[in-house]
Amino acid sequence: MGAQKGKDLLLKIDDGTGFVTVAGMRSRKIAFNAETVDITHAESADRWRELLEGAGVRRASISGRGLFKDAASDTLVRQIFFDGALASCQVVVPDFGTIAGPFQITSLEFSGEHNGEVTFDLGLESAGALTFAAL
């Protein structure tokens, strides 16, 4: 994957009629993590740690910052958060692919300066199996 424009990394949330892009996001990030299961024992070769393959919990985290530019995505994000609902989301990574699956909005913060716009910070955590489709 060569250099890409950051604005092309998109977060989309299903509003019931299709996926809508969360408008106004200036920065966004997706991170994948996998926990390990340590099975090291007294007879492990030279006391090197051993891990159990495929046994750890996998998860994805999405974070973003920006300003809401349209009422539709603003309302959708707020409603999902206050309902405590799981949302079907897509993250489009240019020249890589699309990651899709259920996510829960775990943080929603608003801030603003007296001489500036209101901005938001958004955090989502995966809530089930994710799929990947290469572009």
Image (cartoon, helix red, strand yellow):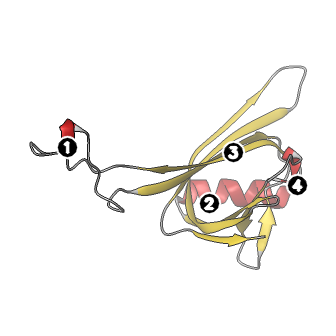
Amino acid bearing label 2: Ile
| Badge number at residue 8 | none
Q: Which residue is mark 4?
A: 70
Task: Name, please, the residue furthest toward the front.
Answer: 46
- What secondary structure is marked by label 3? strand
**Residue at 60% across / 66% down in the picture?**
87
Give the distance between the C-alpha atoms of the residues marked 2 and 4, in whole angstroms.
16 Å
Q: Which residue is mark 1?
A: 45
Give the distance between the C-alpha atoms of the residues marked 4 and 3, in whole angstroms.
21 Å
Circles 1 and 3: CB distance less than 8 Å? no
Q: Position of residue 130 (x, y in %)?
A: 55, 68
**N-terminal-most mark, 1 or 3:** 3
- What secondary structure is marked by label 4? loop
Quarter occupied by the C terminus: bottom right
Give the distance between the C-alpha atoms of the residues marked 1 and 3, in whole angstroms.
39 Å
Give the distance between the C-alpha atoms of the residues marked 1 and 4, in whole angstroms.
59 Å
Give the distance between the C-alpha atoms of the residues marked 3 and 2, in whole angstroms.
20 Å
Tell me the crowding category of disc 3: few under 14, some 14 to 19, or many 20 or more residues within 10 angstroms, Cα based: some
**N-terminal-most mark, 3 or 2:** 3
Amino acid bearing label 4: Asp
Q: Position of residue 22 (x, y in %)?
A: 79, 56
**Residue at 87% across / 48% down in the picture?**
4
Q: Which residue is mark 2?
A: 80
**N-terminal-most mark, 1 or 4:** 1
Circles 2 and 1: CB distance less than 8 Å? no
Q: Is residue 36 left or right of residue 62?
A: left
Tell me the crowding category of disc 2: few under 14, some 14 to 19, or many 20 or more residues within 10 angstroms, Cα based: some
**N-terminal-most mark, 4 or 3:** 3
Q: Nearer the viewer, residue 44 or 62?
A: 44
Mark nearest the camera among 4 and 3 is 3
